[in-house]
Amino acid sequence: MANEIELVLDFADPTDPACKRPLGDYRYSTVLHKTNRADESDVYCGLDMLNKPVDRSATIPSKFATSFDLLVHAANLHPNVEHLGVREKLVEPDGKETLGEYKWTTLSESVETIRIIGTALISEPGLVEEIHLEDAILKSGRLLVFDELSQENLASVKELGLKHIHMDELLAKYKDKVIQPPKRRREDIATIVYTSGTGGSPKGALHSNLSLMTLFSRLALSGNRLRLFPHFSTISYLPLSHVYERFVEHYCALRLCRIGYYGGNIRNLLDDIKTLKPHVIVGDYRDPHKGTIGGPIGDVIFKIRSIPDMEYDARGNPPRGELLMKASGTMVGYFMRPDLTSEALDSEGWYHTGDVVELQPNMAVKILDRARNFFKLSQGEYIAPEKLENLYIKSPYVDQIFIHGESKRNHIVGIIVVNVEAVAAWASRNGLANAPVSTLLNDEKLIEEVTSSLLDIAEKGCLNSLEKLKVFILIDEPFSTSNGLMTPTFKCIRKQIRARYEEEINAMYDSNIHLNS
């Protein structure tokens, strides 16, 4: 029988039907074990976990502690691949200094360097001043710079007390040295991936070496559904915070595939694709309305938990609720944020995704909503409506506000309950002192005044363009418990408000102008 690692490297022929999931009546998951909790579904797993063919039951031997070890082993099997090595004194996430030795194929040198050094990345001039990266950079303590820093940015780096390393300096320093990879453990932190900070400050998600290793194992156990084979190519255009693309690049290096990096201008991506002609592209190019993500692979298991406030029942037909997942190699936690870690990972190791899902008849999982009140716009940007509402409520014209967005739409819309006294004062200043407030809600000058107030708040709050509210309606009926739009603790019931004003929301999206109910 072939060596276990060779199975990992060489499993599955391109013509093997196991390389892709069949269509039609295929069931994406099955019950692993039943539970008695009324607020949770049974626990489900993928069919791969129960029906593993003997020739695809490859596991990664314990001597390979990191995905980097696999890359080195793959390169040794193919000695024509060029190698580079670096040795630097590094600061580990626990604060200890150590000598970091690492080696990578030139195919993915930047990805491997970032992963092993564990720095915050500055990939283009001026990025150091982006507010959403400031927290991540300060916590990391050092930068790996790929482009030359301007004098202004260099001054900013020094002012922040950060050390910076230039990639070209590392390559020049160690270009003639080939060293063995460091002795690392699977539980050691491999990378810290920062979120975009949609719900506040960016959070650093800690991923261990095991996190990356298990992804390779799962593909080995499921017939190479990425359809990547030696000498195939893929195009890379997503940011480093996109963990899945990072994994694909690791996997490409392991499989000795080619990676083409786009030219940097997303508008020219199609031209780059025409030039490279990649075999595989990471992206979602299908109907965004569908939302079905299939089922788990490898040792991933999941269950669904009811969300009574949103009227989602995990024991309903079909089951609906928050998706909880568990697997080897999941995120370890958030860097220096034990409070957020305990929210995301419970005591039993279940990761609370915050996604509201529905279990389909074929046992596939379909995403419906966000349990944590996030939504994604068509550009792929996540929006935290409560964060925006807490800012816009500062406008003197706003008593209450509801922000809404949809994955098929490219902007947010709002429903604003006006402050009657502020509107009356505005009317008095503009020669409309005797006009009832209800008759002013469609007044273009009032709408311009409110828009100006909101945009001023957005600028002071450093909101991005997608967070700026420009399309809204004005109403004078408050959200309250009596009309079913607020809870007894005075929290907006988002689902009820959305349903109550569905017609107005659709009209705002269809016309992109200010309307009134």
Image (cartoon, grey):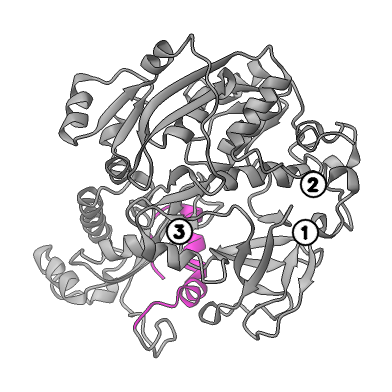
Q: Do residues under tags 2 and 3 come within 8 Å of each other at their CB atoms?
A: no
The residue identified by callout 3 is 508
Q: CA distance from mark 1 to mark 2?
A: 10 Å
Give the residues drawn in magenta, as a range.
Answer: 490-517
Q: Local crowd at mark 1 within 10 Å, few (<14), some, or many (≥20)?
A: many
Q: Quick one: which residue is furthest to the left in this view?
A: 429
Q: Which residue is mark 2?
A: 222
**Of 238 and 58, which appears nearest the observer?**
58
x, y percent for residue 381: 46, 48
Q: Is residue 515 magenta?
A: yes
The residue at the point 32 percent across, 24 percent down is 165
Q: Are marks 1 and 2 in contact (CB under 8 Å)?
A: yes
Question: Which residue type does callout 1 highlight?
Answer: Gly
The residue that mark 1 highlights is 46
Q: Quadrant of residue 14?
A: top right
Earlier sequence position, callout 1 versus callout 2: 1
The answer to whether residue 268 is seen in the rendering is no
- Give above or below for 171 relative to 427: above
- Give me the disc on residue 78: none
Residue type (three-letter) at the residue carrying disc 2: Ser
The answer for how far apart the CA atoms under marks 1 and 3 are is 42 Å
Sequence-first disc among 1 and 3:
1
